[in-house]
Image: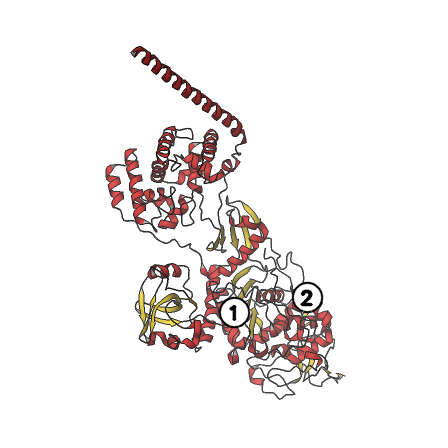
Amino acid sequence: MANYYLVMIKKIITTCLGLLLGLALFGVGLIAIAILVTYPKLPSLDTLQHYKPKMPLTIYSSDGQVIGVYGEQRREFTKIGDFPKVLKNAVIAAEDKRFYDHWGVDVWGVARAAIGNVMAGGVQSGASTITQQVAKNFYLSSERSFTRKFNEALLAYKIEQSLSKDKILELYFNQIYLGQRAYGFASAAQIYFNKNVNELTLAEAAMLAGLPKAPSAYNPIVNPERAKLRQAYILNNMLEEGMITLQQRDQALKEELHYERFVQNIDQSALYVAEMVRQELFEKYGEDAYTQGFKVYTTVDTAHQRVATEALRKVLRNFDRGSSYRGAENYIDLSKSDNVEETVSQYLSTLYTVDKMIPAVVLEASRKGVQIQLPSGRKVTLNSHALGFAARAVNNEKMGEDRIRRGSVIRVKGSGDTFTVVQEPLLQGALVSLDAKTGAVRALVGGYDYHSKTFNRATQAMRQPGSTFKPFVYSAALAKGMTASTMINDAPISLPGKGANGKAWNPKNSDGRYSGYITLRQALTASKNMVSIRILMSIGIGYAQQYIQRFGFKPSEIPASLSMALGTGETTPLRIAEGYSVFANGGYKVSAHVIDKIYDSQGRLRAQMQPLVAGENAPQAIDPRNAYIMYKIMQDVVRVGTARGAAALGRADIAGKTGTTNDNKDAWFVGFNPSVVTAVYIGFDKPRSMGRAGYGGTIAVPVWVEYMRFALKGTSVKPMKAPEGVVSNGGEVYMRERMTTSSDLALDNSGVAPRPTQPARRAVPNENRRRTESGNAPAREELDETPVLPSNTGNNNKQQLDSLF
């Protein structure tokens, strides 16, 4: 009987083993078939063999300073040999201790994971090697399934057959996501510790090595305790593998780590320029602009940018002094926050200190004082003196959402325990400075602060240029046959049917005074509106429109009406500066541009600007003699006219023209010498009067002077040389063939009046300006206020930004 049971047991065991063997063979067969079917369908390894990581667009100034970085992934590609050994050991100890021994899949690791998953009743963990992680990161999803793991293993094997271990490690070290928008360990070293990767300590390396497993869960900033446990696990693994000593491990565990919020070293003065370049690159390359690691070098100089920015801000600040408090700039609801201090800190980390104006959030507000939290985390109480002009806004229900209350976002200035409430100016402006011979932008400021308003007034603000447009009309007159000594009647004029709603148009000089017959030179120096209109009537609107396009203006920017003479069209500071460069460089049309060179991520030159250069390959826009005569006339504007403030530079080579529009809504000054053209515009974004202080000569010229004092420092004074064909007679300059030609204009409402008997004169110096209305123009601070517009001005509120590359 016993033998019978033994025989039966043997049969059962034999049958079971046979079934198991059969099942195993069947499984092996299925796996073999799956491999044979799947392996040929695996993706090509071109992506790995020709690895091009997604790298951000980086924009530089001409002197090599970073002025902008754009791209979702912060990554700095680093070759494997440049990663420190301590980091490589830490990552291998954490992720794949047998990395240099297996063929892509760690069989023993898989077995351990399989047992753990069976015990857990489902797929809970894996045993992915570094090679498998590379396969997943480049080709597969994060789905937890047998199919994905099977494909991952096959891909890992294929990768191991094609790439060296060091190349695989290099791919992993550069591609892996490590939290905080950091991709790759080089980027993570900067973001978490503000260090270069080769400066990491053992403790820091072990902390970073713990991130691949779960970047959020083991983030040392967000979850310091879990991150510390993960760091200890890795250090123990390194000790077991003989990578470090016991003393090194203990010392690393004791090391106190300091996490510094990484701030990209971006020069804040050129953010408007950086955004212009970003738009240009996006138009050229699409989304690839943000992932291909382009390095773009611009024409702007950071030193010029900083001076230009401060010059503009200074004038805007001074104008805003005395203004009442306009209210808090924002509000955050703190009532639902479980940790108010942390909520406020996170919010403030998204804001920037602008012009030493520090953002702060109000924690408590009462008559006794206002408690605020600063970006540093410090809490400061502001008394009534510190509140100053903002005191009336504290819990003032009449101010609605703008009142100062708990959660209000305000700005303060100061240090230590002394802070006062301040506010950003409402008045805005722009400055553009060009190389007159090439059009290269040396400085461009689009407003008070890019962070608060990204609208670029230098390139996007379509505003009336006022009398800064007159020189283009006068240049057209010279081309038509007039001279600087041509006499024109500065007298009132009335034009039936040319005004609004078909009524008569009655333009006037801004001061209401008229000088009778004066020269063309005197008229531009004193910015006489009546003379400008009569000149345009004489040469013809159509002719003037065609001629002025030579300076780079679009037809839509040149009104098809007599108001063109007063600058009632709309254009941008950049376009005006570009137009004046024709006068400055001897009559050549150059193109304003901010991009110089574009390099790819490998340092190869992808594109380089080939600018049009005055006197070389740039087209001749106007007669060089015309440009010279206009330059000489506009020197008088600086010497004795509306731009006398610019004479503070003490240079004999400066020329320019001011401009002020109706009700002092826009103020301009464009000044230049033969090398540099700089345009300054001041005005509110929603046009309104700037009052008596809002003339081009009083508010725009000071910005220009402060910037140009720096821009021209150390450069020699070189007035423009007279080109061939220019002659001088009686203190005036002429084109040779025009010196004896008479082209005086004496137009009035009825037509041509008799020619005056008084001779042509140059604009007279200050001491001789006390003339009657029949004599020379008295030069006020500004005489170029644009009158009320006639109809059909061709206004257009949208500007299509030309390509700057």
Relative depth, front residue between 611 and 401:
401
Q: Is residue 484 above or below residue 256?
A: below
x and y percentages locating residue 315 in the rendered image: 47, 72
| Image quadrant in which the N terminus is located | top left
Sort mark 1 into few (<14), some (14-19) or many (20+) by Cα contacts within 10 Å: many
Q: Is residue 37 above or below residue 187?
A: above
Relative depth, front residue between 802 and 65:
802
Relative depth, front residue between 286 and 510:
286
x and y percentages locating residue 659 in the rendered image: 58, 74
The answer, for residue 352, to whether it is visible in the render is: yes
x and y percentages locating residue 694 in the rendered image: 53, 77
Q: Residue furthest front?
A: 1
Determine whether, in the image, residue 622 is placed left or right of residue 212. Answer: right
Figure colour scheme: secondary structure
- Number of the label disc, if any, that sits on residue 555: 2
- Say which quarter of the image contains residue 412: bottom left
As helix, strand or loop, the secondary structure at mark 2 comes to helix
Q: Is residue 439 above or below residue 31?
A: below
Of labels 2 and 1, earlier in sequence is 1
Relative depth, front residue between 783 and 188:
188
Q: Give me the C-alpha separation between circle 2 and circle 1.
A: 25 Å
| Image quadrant in which the C terminus is located | bottom right
Residue at image x 42%, y 20%? 19
- Number of the label disc, if any, that sits on residue 317: none
| Residue to which mark 1 is pinned | 429
